[in-house]
Image (tube, rainbow, N blue to C red):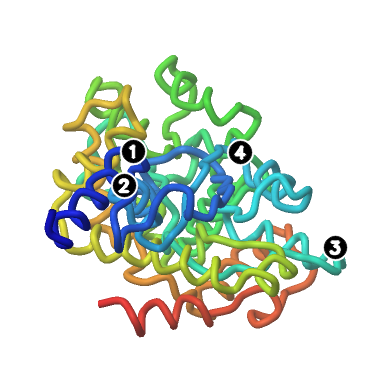
Amino acid sequence: MKPATRVSIFLLILVLVLGFVPGCTSSQELVTIRLNEVVRSIFYAPQYVALNKGFFEEEGLKVELYTGQGADKTMTALLSGQADIGFMGPEASIYVFNQGKDDYSVIFAQLTQRDGSFLVGRNPEPDFKWENLKGKSIIGGRPGGVPEMTLEYVLKQHGVDPFKDVEIITNLQFTATAGAFAGGTGDYVALFEPTASMLEAEGTGTIVASIGEAGGPIAYTAYSALKSYIEKNPEIIQKFTNAIYKGQLWVDQHTPEEIAREIEPFFPDTDIDLLATVVKRYKDQDTWCKNPVMIPETLDHLQDIIQTAGELDKVVPYDKIATTRFAEEAVKNIK
């Protein structure tokens, strides 16, 4: 038997028995990362694209995805060591830093740059003006939550005094607001997708304005890890950021229909056409960051909104809770 033949047979045995292919990364070599996301939402499409396209595996990472159902719960998982990376609003990192913790969370990559909610009314309003909400009632969000604070900020920017010029209902659970509106409560309701589009498709309401567009660019949802974890695992943070950036690039370069197909496994109960509709709406309003670099002005804007709502006593300097080191490196090396 020729030497070349013996080598070929040996390699074939490796492939069949061990599942080993020279030059490829095996599952045994992947580093497991526990990622806790604040909620499951189409709003975070680039993350799901990165997961479904295998971009994390390309970087040598295996992501275990958990859903916290709230920024407070995601941050608790991070602080308690139940998660390596948290995906939530930067306000959680601001609050933790202001509590004086030594090992606080540091933001290293941003995904969304606008509020993801929409104002839904009972009738079409092609000439909608925020000023026209005076004397009306709106089903809002949780008091102190960024969606609610952004809504209040937008109202103030248009000369509407929240809770004085307009009634804002804030005592409903997040999951109950759409049902309450459908049942006759309120003239308007602030909703995230796909609920807003679902009400529109059912004929129950009509999207009249984007709170995200009206609120302007903001550091809205980002990835963070404990300061100690980043110091000990800079290579993992870099690889994670690389994968997220690949997802952002892919979303930016593909159609809503193509994106919908990639994220469909994460939303098995949502119609594919509705997914595409929602993705298009978010894409059209420039919801997703083109890269993971958090711009200081957007974090300043977030803190301005929180301060305006009376929920922040002390502004945190950008360089205390955020780093662009990994995001800038990703942008530099990935094309």
Q: Residues within 10 Å of mark 3 (few under 14, many from 20)?
A: few
Comes first in the chain, label 4 or label 2: 2
Q: Nearer the viewer, residue 51 or 222?
A: 51
Q: Residues within 10 Å of mark 2 (few under 14, many from 20)?
A: some
Q: Secondary structure at mark 3?
A: loop
Q: Nearer the viewer, residue 243 or 141?
A: 243
- Give the CA separation, mark 3 to mark 2: 54 Å
The residue at 35%/60% (across/down) is 58
Residue 129 visible, this angle: no
- Give the CA separation, mark 2 to mark 1: 5 Å
Q: For mark 1, what is the residue?
A: 17
Question: Which of the two marks, 4 or 2, is nearer to us in this view?
Answer: 2
Comes first in the chain, label 3 or label 2: 2
Amino acid found under the numbered disc labelled 1: Val
Q: In the shown orientation, is residue 68 left or right of residue 21?
A: right
Residue 314 placement (x, y as % from top left) = 78, 72
